[in-house]
Image: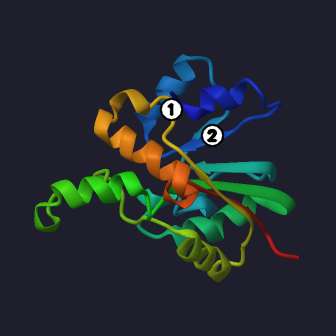
Amino acid sequence: MLLHFELEKICSDLWGLDADSRGIEILESHGSKQILQGDLERLSEVPLDKTFDVIVAGEIIEHLNNPGLFLNGVKRFMSKDSILLLTTINAYCAMRFFYYGVRGKRGKAEPVHPDHVAYYSYSTLKLLLERHDLKMDLFLYYDIGYEHRPHVRWFLKIVNDFSVRIVPHWSDGVIAVCKIPG
């Protein structure tokens, strides 16, 4: 289920950064190398002087207290040709709206991961990127991942699948392909 394992299959040179030492131990116990421990909001402290062709920030921005610190810091690892690939939960996911509407309990039963502090839409993510001197070149939507479908209740899958067929921007998540302008 870890994206890092899938990326290892196709990347010629792969680096990882995680704040969780246990997560790093798990990756290393499976043979992963070049994994650093660090804080995404303090990338200036990461002991690495390298730029990358592609930087994948998968499902992390919604966890950050200050995503601007991350966006400013990640540019240190980018050249003018680098791509920053961000994925995050869609603020307008139909499945979550439905679940919240049915089970909302006056706002006290939101279907929100306990570590999420923000949800993003096209407009909010684009503005955040622009404020931190990054340009969104492409914006896409993605549906529930195959690894998550077995854990989603059957009626929510029906709502999701129906909604996404009608309106793709009601999908589970969003993808932003970003560059340094210029």
Tell me if residue 33 can be seen.
Answer: no
Give the farthest residue toward the left: 105
**In the rendered image, the vertical position of residue 160 relative to residue 67, given as above or below:** above
* Residue nearest the observer in this picture, 111 or 49: 111
Tell me if residue 142 can be seen.
Answer: yes
Residue 42: image quadrant is: bottom right
Label 2 sits on a secondary structure element that is strand
Asked if the residues shown at circle 1 and circle 2 are in contact, with their CB atoms under 8 angstroms apart, the answer is: yes
- Give the residue type that dot 2 points to: Gly
Q: Which residue is mark 1?
A: 24
User: Which x, y percent locates residue 56?
Assistant: 66, 48
Residue that appears at 52% across and 68% down: 121
Looking at marks 1 and 2 on the same chain, the residue that comes earlier in the sequence is marked by 2
- Give the residue type that dot 1 points to: Ile
| Label 2 packing within 10 angstroms: few (<14), some (14-19), many (20+) | some
User: Which x, y percent locates residue 134?
Assistant: 72, 73
* Quarter occupied by the C terminus: bottom right
Residue 107 lies left or right of residue 126; in this view the side is left
Label 1 sits on a secondary structure element that is helix
* Residue nearest the observer in this picture, 67 or 152: 152
Residue that appears at 54% across and 26% down: 27
Q: Which residue is mark 2?
A: 16
User: Which x, y percent locates residue 99?
Assistant: 26, 52
Q: CA distance from mark 1 to mark 2?
A: 9 Å
